[in-house]
Amino acid sequence: MALEITTVGAQVKYAFEATSGTRPTSGYTVLPDVNEAPEFDLSVETIDASNITDTVTRYVPGRQDPGGDVSFTLNHTNAVVSAWDTLVTTAETNYAQGKRLWFAYVFPGADDAYYWSGQPRKLGSSGITQNSLSTIPAHCVVNDVAGWDTAPTA
């Protein structure tokens, strides 16, 4: 019997490297009011390895592509705007010191979390539609993908 993992109660957490080049394993902070977090498909580029004697094109795997620019959808609250602005400013300071920001997707019931590093960018704004929740797109430029590993400790 499979024990499926759901997104109910999932969290997006973040932490900065204390030591440049070492992903943190603890001390992650919950990103508030996340409505949707970006998916990581890691599509593989292919490289044509054919030569003139080949009658069928041959490929070899190239780099995996996490997508470059990814976007969270955040519920529009004053706390979210403040938290994201602080995250951007803190990230800029840390990057100047060679320390990256890591995100962790933590799913209830899962042994591991999904880790990736990115540089958060200044917030945009949602459009305005009648009788709807205001959400804000929050973009990050992906620097690295560590993938699945032991979930961070408190």
Image (cartoon, grey):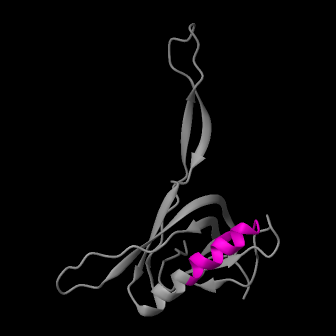
**Residue 95 percent coordinates (x, y):** 69, 68
Where on the picture, by quarter, is residue 31? bottom right
Residue 43 visible? The answer is yes
Rendered residue at 60%/65% (across/down): 118
The residue shown at (64%, 79%) is 90
x then y, percent, for residue 51? 59, 13
Q: Nearer the viewer, residue 35 or 5?
A: 35
Q: Which residue is at the front of the view, 67 or 150? A: 67
Queried whether the magenta region covers residue 101, the answer comes back as yes
| Residue 70 in picture, x, y percent from top left | 48, 62
Point out residue 26 in the picture as x, y percentages from the top left corner: 75, 82
Indicate left or right for 92 with 74 as reference.
right
- Horizontal side, residue 56 vs residue 87: left or right: left
Q: Is residue 87 magenta?
A: yes
Query: Residues in magenta?
Result: 86-102
Look at 64% across and 86% down and name the residue there. 29
The residue located at (51%, 55%) in the rendering is 41
Residue at the right extreme of this rendering: 19
Residue 112 visible in the displayed image? no
- Name the residue furthest left: 130
Q: Quadrant of the N terminus?
A: bottom right
Which corner quadrant of the image does residue 25 belong to? Answer: bottom right
Q: Is residue 133 left or right of residue 13?
A: left
